[in-house]
Image (tube, rainbow, N blue to C red):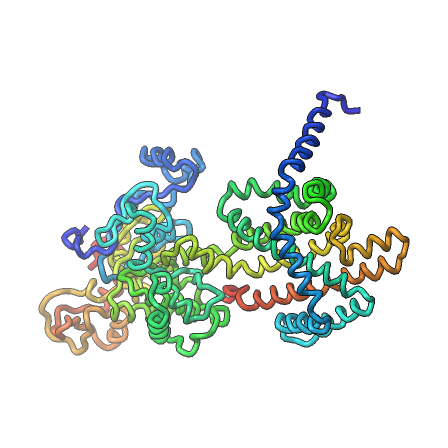
Amino acid sequence: MSETNQNDQLAIRMQGVTKIFGSDPRSALALLRSGKSKSEVQSQTNHVVGLDNVSLDVAKGQIFVVMGLSGSGKSTLIRHVNRLIEPTAGEIFVYGDDVLKMSLEQLRSYRRTKVAMVFQKFGLLPHRSVLDNVAYGLEVRGVDKAKRLDEAARWIEVVGLSGYENSKPRQLSGGQQQRVGLARALAMDTDIILMDEAFSALDPLIRSGMQDQLITLQKELNKTILFITHDFDEALKIGDRIAVLKDGALQQVGKPEDIVLKPANEHIEEFVREVNKARAIHVRSIMERGEFEPCDYTVPATARCEDVLPYFAEHQWVGVTDDGGHQVGRVTAKRVIGALARYTPGVG
Amino acid sequence: MFPELIDTRPLRRSIDEGLNWVVRNWGDGFEAAARPLLILLNAIEGLLVATPWWLIIGLLALIAWLATRRWQLPTVVAAALFLVGLMDLWRDAMSTMALMLAATITAIIVSIPVGVAMSRSFNVRRAMTPLLDLMQTLPSFVYLIPTVMIFGPGKIPALIATIVYAAPPLVRLTDLGLRSVDPAVMEASRAFGTNPTQRLFGVQIPLALPTILAGVNQTTMMALAMVVIASMIGAGGLGYQVLQGIGRLEVSRGLFAGLGIVVLAIVFDRITQAFGKQLQGKIGLSEQRA
């Protein structure tokens, strides 16, 4: 992997994590190690393979998305990071600390201070007000009342729920409830936030708004976010890196473009086929690099294909500029069409 | 006829002799151990009898109002209790209410910790379930007689028999309520680093409270159902009036006292149910709107 030299930058490191559900996971593990497939193990021993030898490196300050269909083990994976689920085999490090070696007391203190979590079903305390829900994590940590309520009020404002402090969760819509869940996690001020299908239960429009807000917040706060989703579009939109999980095994890990342009196998190609590629592919990954005559129109390298499409109505070339505004390359309509239409390895 | 495979007479004799031995040697000890129960019962009864009737009616109507925030239930409660007074049953009704309250309070103190233990340990649940079944199905006379032998006739065995009969639903509903707390909420609480005690008091008990209150409601009802049997061994109160009515073939006496019991049942049933509903409104069904 290209990030081996950035080991000190790693927030989360999972090594060969395997999880088998059942009464005697050890024997099933031996079977799995001997090369049997997930379904063979299940039919022979009645044990379910949740995760199969998953190794992941999540760098500090990025949104890392784990994408997979239901039953792919993605929710199991995220619960290993704060050890809500114990792995059958493997190692998990968070900022270099071995999560699996922690005693129960250490584990609780780790959960109170290092990782916060947002849940698909919100997991709010229905008998408490919004304010007390957001302050919950700090309360568990032992922060005194005035201070935690102050903090909570501040985060309620950040997620845009001012005025709802004294409402009960049931009085809020789904989107608002998830904002409470997000504020509760943010109020913990942990470096790592785990988000388990956090937006999956929301309506498309509200979901899109929450995604934008998450991206903005992440840029401001520079958190490390491990985000689980079954929605490939969502993964492409918010992910700095994406890992695709199927049957508990990793299929591909890479930047969103890598996955769209060079899907590692048929399973991923199926996802790619359904996705809005014009939004997923950045112009920088398909441009011709080099010195060209300055073009009439330029876009930044972070622009997406859909951003340059309108220019092709009148222009053959569109320039691509770096952060400093210097033209570093150009794209043609042909190149964009090539990228959007076919996915042979080697494009770009 | 079923063949006599073993002779059970020695076994039965030893059970009987064992009980006699217990009564002879430990009877005083048991009586001393049960004294707090008697003190509790007498204190409640003394308080209820010493309080003027209009104050009791007023207080219960106020509680009913607090539970519903409407005027209907307080009116029904006041009218029903007034009727008890009219039927010349006030003193007896207070005895019966005292027995019911003492049994319910004791049952709450004992049952909730047991229910908590059951909800947390599969083994405790497996051990307790048949015992609770036994307490609910064994005819009460079967354990009434040994209790009377140990404590002598009077209020203590009556109270104990009432508790044995009335406590199981509260234990069961406490266990059920704690275990059926939304697992998503429990997991979220765990993810924030709570320990089991914080989860019990901060999440489980508040969310299970409506179910636990339903258990309290059941306990009060079952305690009232025991008053006639309890009066056979010296509990007094409305149950005793029913017994006398039967004994003297005075249908009217039995009927009035029976109606008195019904009135108490309705009053306490409606009040506890209303509190349960109020609580459920505060917390229940919260995550349906996702």
Residue A120 x/y as whole percent: 42, 60
Residue B27 x/y as whole percent: 65, 40
Q: Which of B183 and B92 is in front in this view?
A: B92
Q: Nearer the viewer, residue A113 or B148?
A: B148
Residue B37 x/y as whole percent: 63, 52
Residue drawn at the location 27% of the way across and 72% of the way down: A307
Relative to B92, is B25 on the left or the right?
Answer: left
* Rendering quarter of residue A199: bottom left
* Rendering quarter of residue A209: bottom left
Relative to residue B17, is residue A59 depicted above or below? below
The answer to whether residue B262 is visible is: no
* Rendering quarter of residue A157: bottom left
Q: Which of B267 and A284 is in front in this view?
A: B267
Relative to B181, is A344 on the left or the right?
Answer: left
Q: Residue furthest left?
A: A291
The answer to whether residue A166 is visible is: yes
Relative to residue A158, is residue A139 depicted above or below? above
Residue drawn at the location 80% of the way across and 59% of the way down: B258
Residue drawn at the location 55% of the way across and 60% of the way down: B209
Count of numbered circles on the image: 0
Residue drawn at the location 75% of the way across and 21% of the way down: B4
Q: Quadrant of the N terminus of chain B?
A: top right
Residue A59 x/y as whole percent: 22, 57
